[in-house]
Amino acid sequence: MTMPDGYDETRQAAWVLNPITEIKGVRVALIMTLDGMIRARAGDLTVDESEGIAAMTSAAAASLRAAGNAALRAPESTPIGTITLNNAAGTYMVMPAGAGTNTLIAAAGDDEMPMGVVAHAMARQAKKLGEQLMSVPARTDDGMS
């Protein structure tokens, strides 16, 4: 499903992404599901660009998880932590938004982006987002909640 430019699944997502995009050098930030669906975006990416990045990030995260777990002889179910990619254009960082949330948070920035500051802000915001996502009550057998 293609969504109009400027789409945000929920305006409340700004509280997660704004503290990250306010850091000098950060160009974009995204919230996405592990299966590659974009949930929110901040920055100058179009919807199509955001959706493409979410799909590629999902595939890369799954591949890196499998490769890392095999190389480290970790159990197959071991979750990933932070994934960081650096190249001449800058840095792209991805991390889970809390355990068991099926959600990733990502940020990309230029070579002046302070990685330590961004990683700390992302971890703080990912924890808050994860807590919010996990606070939704579980469904009961009667389907009423």
Image (cartoon, rainbow, N blue to C red):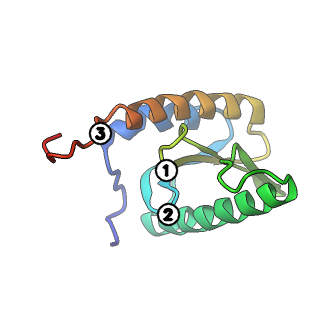
Q: Residues within 10 Å of mark 1 (few under 14, many from 20)?
A: some
Crowd rating for badge 3 (residues with CA inside 10 Å; few <14, some 14–19, many 20+): few
In which quarter of the view is residue 139 placed?
top left
Q: Residues within 10 Å of mark 2 (few under 14, many from 20)?
A: some
Alpha carbons under labels 2 and 1: distance apart: 8 Å
The quarter of the picture where residue 131 lies is top left
Question: Decide: marks 2, 1 in contact (CB < 8 A)?
Answer: yes
Residue 115 percent coordinates (x, y): 76, 36
Which residue is found at the position 44% from the left and 62% from the top?
A: 37
Q: For the point 78% across and 40% down, which residue is it?
A: 112
Residue that numbered label 1 is attached to: 102
Label 2: element kind: loop
Q: Residue at the spot x=46%, y=34% of the render? A: 129
In whole angstroms, how far apart are the C-alphas of marks 2 and 3? 21 Å
Say which label, 2 or 1, has the lower sequence index.
2
Q: Which residue is mark 3?
A: 138
From the image, tell me which residue sits under label 2: 35
The answer to the question of whether label 2 and label 3 lie on touching residues, with beta carbons closer than 8 A, is no
Q: Does residue 114 appear in the picture of this structure? A: no
**Vertical arrangement, residue 23 with respect to residue 54, above or below:** above
Mark nearer the N terminus (2 vs 3): 2
Quarter placement of the N terminus:
bottom left
Could you tell me which secondary element the residue under label 1 belongs to?
loop
Rendered location of residue 91, percent (x, y): 75, 50
Residue 45, position in %: x, y? Answer: 51, 59
Dot 3: element:
loop
**Mark 2 belongs to which amino acid?**
Asp
Q: What amino acid type is highlighted by mark number 1?
A: Asn
